[in-house]
Amino acid sequence: MPIRQLPAHLINQIAAGEVVERPASVVKELLENALDAGSTRIEIDIEQGGGKRIRIRDNGGGIPQAELALALSRHATSKIASLDDLEQVRSLGFRGEALPSIASVSRLILSSRHSEAQQGWKLFGDGQEIFDEPEPVAHATGTTVDVVDLFFNIPARRKFLKTEKTEFGHIEDMVRKLALSRFDVGFELNHNQKNTLRLRPVDDRSGAERRVAEICGSAFVEQSLYLDYEAAGLRLWGWVGLPTFSRSQADLQYFYVNSRNVRDKLISHAVKQAYQDVMYHGRHPAFVLFLELNPQLVDVNAHPTKQEVRFREGRLVHDFLFRTLHQALADIRPGDEAGAPTQLPVQTHEPPASPEENPPQSPFFKGGGEERRPVYQAQYQPRLQMPVREQMAAYQQLYQPVVLPKEEAEARELKPDLPMNTPDSADMPPLGFAIAQLHGVYILAQNATGLVVVDMHAAHERITYEYLKQSMAQDAIRSQPLLVPGSLNVSKKEADHAEQHADTFRALGFELDRLGLEKLTIRAVPSLLKESDTEALVRDVLADLITHGESNRIQNAMNEILATMACHGSVRANRKLSITEMNALLRDMERTERSGQCNHGRPTWTHMSLDQIDKLFLRGR
């Protein structure tokens, strides 16, 4: 077959195969055009799941009469004009392919009135390069795109469409994603003349949270943390779900880069790592996050559907996302108000400040003055500075069984070292004061608003684990030379990266030498990992360095060992604790990072307000 030029309508249909996968793809492209046009209100009318009709009306700037035909031509756009514009795209659309691709596989009617025009005009498109003259039409300022009989001229593609309910479900998901990207725009979605979604434009945080609650559910907003942090030219803001609000599927994850919804491997990896130490196995976090950066630092022209992006400083973005989210989750303390703004430091290597220098941000600790500081804050602080071995011994000593004469035990129960304040006391801590131990497993405490139930083993396990990690970070990673160095056969690329990142391996406790083009020798390993499969660990670290430029596998392997040590060294079930010891555990929880979950991701405590308890007993009815 000789080489020949394809006809215009066939070229458009080929392009449509990349842009228009299903009715939801049409909705996405048209909504992005409406948002780029400066719309503040968008109406979407769908019939028969989008296969019969898709009509989108906006109140944007509109299209002049002379440019209607040009709008349906391939690679015609008003959003970029040069290579410099392409390298700093600020709009959602920019290729000029959407409208001609949609017109090539449907019967399209484009109606618009420019903001400076006296009347509107409409144009019919069917994928051809030659159009009839625009016709006058009564139309408000803005644009209406009416897509009828999608894939009418491609029967094979139409057969691949799912049921009406399934296709509309994809459309609804797409509208919700775009509605989360622009809180200042109102959206209305109708299916078969029945309204299914109506979102009003908002301009403040409370209104934004109402929209997030409508789309993601009120439970997400109630159990999420709002953050807003900016550093190194990057800004991350939005809502991250608490680790206890995890999902069995990754179906509640919305991430936006400069208001564009994306699914990127680098972003997913950073978020996954941030939740790694607090998420239950097999669960997925929930979040609605917005990353803002200079458009010159991100390439949005990496995929036909524009769902993937490429960062010019990928390592910087990954590190910024991980550290910000990691610290946000670590800074959650009992008593913190969910959804309160969090100010986060960039560096997380420095040991946290003592409670006296930086009291937890909760209603109980407001003021920060010396006269407001509770006396019990510093009583157990010395354990933070102990080496690992002494610290473990101190905790085992603190929570060991207490055997006292009956009279002395009763006296301690009645008069503990820490006073039993009343609920309306100004000095009531977030977790309150212990009142009893239930079945040797749970601690019952009373705080200012109700009842607190603590799983004492899970809570102590997290406390010990965090202190061990802190001590390990302060003492640095110790290396142990091998009596017989191990050899490792690798690829040339892996050997090059091992040589390039020799300082990284040395900081992690490994000593690697290159013996040949494709051979490494391991001369020293971290002392905690001497019984582990170090060869497999080195290979995994090299794979991470090649893919992401960094690796946390060694630290994670050490954390697993420290978690095991913490589990074995923590207070066990059926161990009798005095009121003083239970209160000591509660105070340590209030100061410890990630104390809401144990090392395995299970919750460590729960709270029942007095109103909830009253409802159980029908009080006040």
Image (cartoon, rainbow, N blue to C red):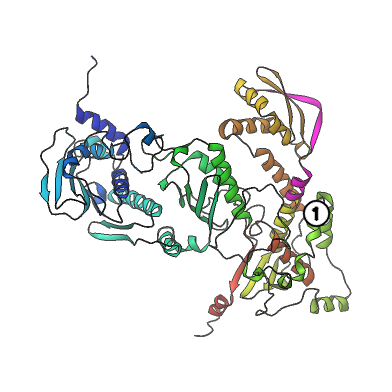
Q: Residue furthest top?
A: 2
Disc 1 secondary structure class = helix
Does the magenta segment cover residue 470?
Answer: yes
Query: Percent position (x, y) of residue 180?
Result: 40, 54
Q: Residue furthest bottom?
A: 620
Between 129 and 586, which is closer to the camera in this rendering? 129
Query: Percent position (x, y) of residue 118?
Result: 14, 53
Position above or below: 43 against 82? below
Q: Residue furthest front?
A: 116
Taking the image as shown, residue 180 lies to the left or right of residue 55, namely right
Q: Is residue 207 visible?
A: yes
Specify the quadrant of the image occupied by residue 5.
top left
* Amino acid marked by disc 1: Gln
Of the 4 image quadrants, the one containing the N terminus is top left
Query: Percent position (x, y) of residue 507?
Result: 72, 36
Query: Percent position (x, y) of residue 491?
Result: 61, 21
Q: Residue at x 43, y 59 (%)?
A: 212
Between 156 and 412, which is closer to the camera in this rendering? 412
Between 472 and 250, which is closer to the camera in this rendering? 472
Position above or below: 159 against 34? above
Between 535 and 572, which is closer to the camera in this rendering? 535
Tally of marks? 1
Position above or below: 79 against 447? above
Q: For mark 1, what is the residue?
A: 385
Does the magenta segment cover residue 407?
Answer: no
- Magenta residues, as a range? 469-490
Taking the image as shown, residue 527 lies to the left or right of residue 146, namely right
Q: Is residue 272 visible?
A: no
